[in-house]
Structures are given as structure tokens and as C-alpha cells.
Image (spheres, rainbow, N blue to C red):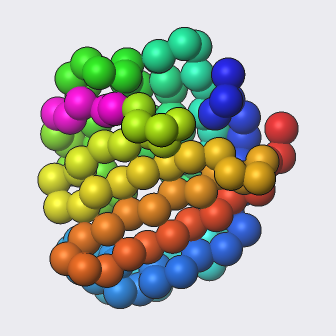
Amino acid sequence: MAFTGKYEVESEENYDDFVKRIGIPSDVIEKGRNFKIVTEVVQNGNEFCWSQLYPGGQSMTNKFTIGKEADMETMGGKKFKATVYMEGGKVVVDFPNYHHTAEIAGGKLVEISTAGGVTYKRISKKLA
């Protein structure tokens, strides 16, 4: 299972520009800056349970099967339906206001989100 594991944010690029672009409130942006978000992924074939654990005990979990529509939640807490695809080893999904990909590269979880010409890149190191 290529994605299964627990990952902690190691570096980010364009956090402020991206979260402003997708409409995250200023106070939330401030709190989220430099958070050591832990992403936990359990992959069973084409089925995924993708959780993000935030400091303070908050979390967000999306469960989905590649190629099937699923109920999802955005960083900002909005609920929506989407179909997640696998393209060239990357998990690919269109959120309501941004495009997101995730892949394992060099043993790290590399996530790239794009909204309105702004690209946010988050790299997380594997913990377990």
C-alpha cells in the first residue's frame, strides 16, 4: 500500500496566498501557519481513509474509493461530493475551489493544491 502511513508536515510553500485565495478567514490562517499537521492515510486497494490531525485535537477525515463519488470535506469545513482518481501514482481530486494532488515521492507525502493561479505545496515526512 503505497500511501499507508502517518506523515508530519516538514515544509510548505505559498500557504498564505493559497488559503486567502480559497477564502479561509484571517484568524484561522494565523492559527494554521506553522502547524505541524499530521496526515494519516490507510489505503486498502482502491479504498482510502485520509485523516488530518491538527494541534488541539481537531481532525478532518475523508473516506473514498478511487473512481467512485464520495462525501468529502474541505480544509475550511465545507462538505461536498467528489470523485477521486488515480493518475500516474497520484491521488487527484477537484475540491469546490481548488485542484489537489498527492503522491509519495522519495518516501515523503507531497501534496499540491492549486487555486486561481496560486500553487500551495506541502511536503510531509513519514513518521510511521
Between 8 and 117, which is closer to the camera in this rendering?
117
Q: Residue furthest right?
A: 128
**Splitting the image into 4 quarters, where does residue 87 fall?**
top left
Q: Quadrant of the C terminus?
A: top right
Residue 35 shown left or right of residue 98 in the figure: right
Q: Residue furthest top?
A: 45
Residue 11 shown left or right of residue 54 in the figure: right
Between 87 and 36, which is closer to the camera in this rendering?
87
Residue 116 shown left or right of residue 35 in the figure: left
Which is the main secondary structure of the residues drawn in magenta?
strand
**Splitting the image into 4 quarters, where does residue 34 fall?**
bottom right
Q: Quadrant of the N terminus?
A: top right
Q: Residue furthest front?
A: 88
Please report the residue visible at 35 percent of the width from the left and 86 percent of the height from the top.
17
Please report the residue visible at 42 percent of the width from the left and 51 percent of the height from the top.
101
Stretch in magenta: 81-85
Q: Does residue 6 sit above or below 70 in this rendering?
A: below
Q: Is residue 25 visible?
A: no
Q: Is residue 68 visible?
A: yes
Q: Position of residue 30 (x, y in %)?
A: 46, 84
Tell me how many marks there are: 0
Residue 6 shown left or right of residue 94 in the figure: right
Asked if residue 89 is among those painted magenta in the image, a careful observer would answer no
Between 74 and 91, which is closer to the camera in this rendering?
91
**Splitting the image into 4 quarters, where does residue 27 fall?**
bottom left
Q: Position of residue 89 (x, y in %)?
A: 53, 36
Q: Position of residue 3 (x, y in %)?
A: 63, 33
Please report the residue visible at 24 percent of the width from the left and 48 percent of the height from the top.
94
